[in-house]
Image: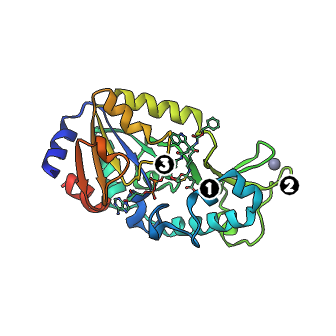
Amino acid sequence: MIEEAVRVILKARFAIAFTGAGISAESGVPTFRGKDGLWKHYKPEELATPEAFERDPALVWDFYRWRMQKILEAKPNPAHYALAELERLGILRAVITQNVDDLHHEAGSENVIELHGNIFRVRCTSCSYRENLKESGRIREFVNSKDLPRCPQCGSLLRPDVVWFGEALPRTALERAFKLAEKSDVVLVIGTSGVVYPAAYIPYIVKEHGGKVIEVNVRRSGITPIADIFLRGKAGEVMAKILD
Ligand code: BJW
Ligand code: ZN
């Protein structure tokens, strides 16, 4: 199976990757669904929503501070590095990710499309204020603070610059991702349950346009029914073998 996947990838004219929380699992970043992914028994649908933030911003900020902390401690794993290497070799054209953890950039991938935002950015709930905490050097301050973060311009609550359920995805990112999917002849789908839309359309678009779907996951997902090649295993281990 791996040999077949390698053959398809090497033959590709325009390959892309579509990644989810599972690619960062081996880096120590908890996934959303599944027993290890839950935070204090809350489902993502109960925390990653504008309604949850309105009702209880302190609870939602606690969740995001916990995630920021985990992500700060995390380093890219062989799967992130493999995608960066495939891009460097001119085989992979883009990484479309649902992750907010920045690990693709850290591994050296350059053309990364973030569909669900980035956990190191915050924005004001009232005005246009935005801040990149990596650039401003205020991550530690954010993670360690117990107070609700406030906008320095208008005093309203700040929120993570990520996409919650019921919110629109960043338009240019989604349009770029769909266009890339239309012209791709191979998509490597790594570590996603493939149940959150519109992101999960990406592999379907590739398939509809005649491209091949190669999936890497420890278990079956919403994408598996259309996968041409399903590689069962941990992302880091499988991707390291592919690069071998
Ligand atoms: C490993 C591994 C290892 C583990 N190696 N693998 C069409 C149909 C049905 C519903 C909808 C639809 N269109 C829209 C909806 C509604 C909704 C939706 O999709 N709901 C479904 C859940 C039913 N979608 C939305 O609300 C979206 N917005 C929208 O559509 O807006 C419309 C609109 C338009 C115009 C104006 C206004 C509105 C927004 C979705 C936002 C999702 N946000 C989150 C949080 C982001 C911030 C944060 O990170 O905190 O995104 S939720 C969460 O799920 C996060 C993830 O990116 C996303 C996907 O999860 P992912 O990555 O797949 O993770 P897991 O945990 O589910 O899976 C991990 C996988 O890895 C598993 O398969 C494991 O087996 C595997 N694995 N270890 C390999 N070592
Ligand atoms: Zn403000």
Q: CA distance from mark 3 to mark 1?
A: 14 Å
Between 180 and 45, the one lying in front of the other is 45
Question: Vertically, is 178 above or below 150?
Answer: above
Question: Vertically, is 236 above or below 84?
Answer: below
Instruction: Name the element at disc 1.
Output: loop
Q: Amino acid at mark 3?
A: Gln
Q: Picture quarter containing residue 18?
A: top left
Does the beta carbon at disc 3 come under 8 Å from ligand 1? yes
Furthest residue toward right: 154
Residue under the image location 84 percent in, 50 percent down: 153
Mark 2 or 3: the one toward you = 3
Residue under the image location 13 percent in, 49 percent down: 3
* Colour scheme: rainbow
Residue beneath disc 3: 98
Does the beta carbon at disc 1 come under 8 Å from ligand 1? yes
Q: Amino acid at mark 1?
A: Ala
Between 136 and 123, the one lying in front of the other is 123
Answer with mark 2 or mark 3, whichever residue precedes in sequence: 3
Q: In the visual, does 198 lie left or right of 12?
A: right
Does the beta carbon at disc 2 come under 8 Å from ligand 2? yes
Q: Residues within 10 Å of mark 1 (few under 14, many from 20)?
A: some
Residue 88, can we see it?
no
Q: Could you say which disc has been placed on residue 48 in the image?
A: 1
Residue under the image location 62 percent in, 63 percent down: 64
Between 102 and 134, the one lying in front of the other is 102
Residue beneath disc 2: 155
Between 150 and 171, the one lying in front of the other is 171
Asked if the residue at tag 1 contacts the one at tag 3, i.e. Cβ–Cβ closer than 8 Å, the answer is: no
Q: Amino acid at mark 2?
A: Gly
Q: Position of residue 21 (x, y in %)?
A: 44, 57
Residue 34, can we see it?
yes
